[in-house]
Image (spheres, rainbow, N blue to C red):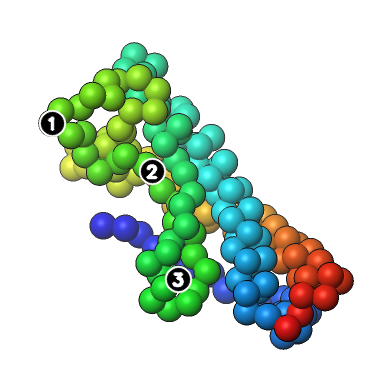
Amino acid sequence: MAAEGSFSLIGVEQVLKNMEYVSDTVRGKRGRAALRKAGMIVVAAAKSKVERYDDPGTGRKISENVAIRWNGRRNKATGDIAWRIGVLKGARIPKNNHEGSGAGSATPHWRLIEFGTKVSIAKPFLRPALADNVGAVTSAFVSELTKGIASAIKTGKTL
């Protein structure tokens, strides 16, 4: 059960105007890089929020498994540029768990912390990571995309 967040960009008319001058290939490449850089702000925030819940006794660190991954399925279906931010190896521990319990091991208990259970209150770290940083993410995205488009226009990769 994945929670999906979205927001709209206001005040980016100049960026949109510049995007008309570059090809779809350049726009996609620059947009993908800009959105990834903006997404890294959310990843860093989520890692810092969840570090307090990592148990040093087990060695399993949720913060090491928070990552950003390209959402190719959505890109192929809709053409949208999309990155997924979440916890790797978080679904379940396999029966033959050869990873042990060291750093980088599976951390399926992240869901119990993020969403809570009937006996423990939810202590979300992924959802607030985006909610608390919407302004920074938006400005980073606009800044990086503006630089990328200006670079594409300057090098003549417009059409």
Q: Is residue 116 left or right of residue 20?
A: left
Residue 59 % position (x, y): 36, 19
The residue at which mark 3 appears reads as 75
Q: CA distance from mark 2 to mark 3?
A: 21 Å
Above or below residue 71? Residue 62 is above
Circles 1, 2 touching at the beta carbon (< 8 Å): no
Residue mark closest to the camera, 1 vs 2? 1
Above or below residue 124? Residue 81 is below
Residue depicted at x 67% and y 55%: 136
Question: Dividing the picture into quarters, in which one does residue 121 lie?
Answer: top left
Above or below residue 104? Residue 44 is below
Q: Residue furthest left?
A: 95
Q: CA distance from mark 1 to mark 3?
A: 33 Å
Residue mark closest to the camera, 2 vs 3? 3
Q: Tag 1: Cα neighbours inside 10 Å, few (<14), some, or many (≥20)?
A: few
Residue depicted at x 53% and y 56%: 131
N-terminal label among 1 and 2: 2
Helix, strand or loop at disc 1? loop
Is any part of residue 132 visible from this angle? no
The residue at which mark 2 appears reads as 87
Question: Dividing the picture into quarters, in which one does residue 66 lie?
Answer: top left
Residue type of the residue flagged with mark 2: Val
Q: Tag 2: Cα neighbours inside 10 Å, few (<14), some, or many (≥20)?
A: many
Choose between 90 and 71: the one closer to the eye. Answer: 71
Residue type of the residue flagged with mark 3: Asn
Q: Is residue 23 left or right of residue 4?
A: right
Helix, strand or loop at disc 2? strand
Task: State the quadrant of the N terminus.
Answer: bottom left
The residue at which mark 1 appears reads as 95
Task: State the quadrant of the C terminus.
Answer: bottom right
Q: CA distance from mark 1 to mark 2?
A: 20 Å
Question: Dividing the picture into quarters, in which one does residue 111 lie?
Answer: top left
